Image: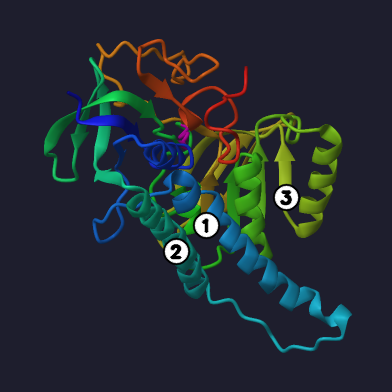
Amino acid sequence: MADYDVIVIGAGPGGYVAAIRAAQLGMKTACVEKWIDADSKPVYGGVCLNVGCIPSKALLDSSHKYHEASHAFDVHGIKVGKVDIDVPAMIDRKQKVVKQLTGGIAGLFRSNKVEGISGTGKLLKDRKVEVTDKDGKKRTLSADNIILAAGSVPIEIPPTPLDGDTIVDSTGALEFQAVPKRLGVIGAGVIGLELGSVWSRLGSEVVVLEAMDTFLPMIDQQIAKEAMKILTKQGLDIRLGAKVTGSELKKGKGKGVKVTFEDKESKKEESFDKLIVCVGRKPQTEGLLSDDCGVKRDQRGFIEVDDHCGTGVPGIYAIGDIVRGPMLAHTRPGNPSPD
């Protein structure tokens, strides 16, 4: 007899919703999640709640209020003195928002009798899951049905290796403790533009380097054109057709990073205090599957599924960022969009 009716690997918007619904339907359900906080306690909500849409929107809200107070109150007849920004306090407020929402999911797990299991899950053959906790201890669980919902991670590129301080990904860009005087953003996708907008409003000189010649090619081009106008008016220096070829961390006083890139004209370079690499995300499927589990991945690392999210292995399903379709929390986890 299996240990559970359903085991879900991953507690993001796809995984935690699936786990709660399964439990509500009377199934004995467990959800495996590797994310832990500074106190080594499990944290639910995945990328969206912890380092994605929720914290970025919290910072956008704060930066918008600062920008209005600094530049727009006078048109309403509101007179204020010099407005300052306390970045650590802003980051702390963001973290409180995240903690409240992730704690809410923990409460939903308890009220719906979903067993949260802290650790990294790996699918084995015969509908088994190996769970490795933070101390490296392993145990094996079995279930009649297993839902893979491991989410995604930022893509790294060789020309700009991350150092966790000067060169960061989208997660690191949510933790700056001061406004960079000059900020570089590689990638003019929605994540790069959002983060660039936050720090631009707070006073950073933001340069966005985008390798493609078309701005936001994935959306309606009339909307993209208007977005370009608004962001440029806001102060973002968006350079299309700029392919980054290398980076060099500066030493000594001032530090920062020098970035080299090529456009249609020539080879160029720019220096920044901080650099954010936002060139997209990839499915977090490395280490998720044993070689003999039977589940297949495509060339990009996405798990292959049918129209009902079945993997072709009886009782094994995959949802969310690790399958085809847009990596968006509000898309239906159970119905991935066709390619």
Query: Which numbered dot is residue 55?
Result: 1
Q: Dot 1 surroundings within 10 Å: few (below 14), some, or many (20 or more)?
A: many
Circle 1 sits in a helix, a strand or a loop, which is it? helix
Q: Are marks 2 and 3 in contact (CB under 8 Å)?
A: no
Q: CA distance from mark 1 to mark 3?
A: 24 Å
- Callout 2, which amino acid? Gln
Q: Is residue 41 left or right of residue 75?
A: left
**Quadrant housing residue 162:** top left
Q: How is the image coloured?
A: rainbow
Marked residue nearer the N-terminal end (1 or 3):
1
Asked which quadrant contains residue 289, the reply is top left
Residue 131 position (above or below residue 315): below
The mark lying in front, picked from 2 and 3, is 2
Label 3: how many Cα within 10 Å (few below 14, some 14–19, many 20+): some
Q: Locate residue 317, reporting x and y percent.
A: 41, 22
**Judging from the image, what secondary structure is the residue with disc 3 in?**
strand
Front position in the image: 101 or 168: 101
256 above or below 322? below
216 versus 44 height, above or below: above
Magenta extent: 153-157
Q: Quadrant of the C terminus?
A: top right
Residue tagged 2: 100
Find disc 3 in the rendering and name its residue.
237
Report the residue at 29% width, 29% height from top: 5
Residue under the point 46% across and 13% down: 299
The amino acid marked with disc number 3 is Asp
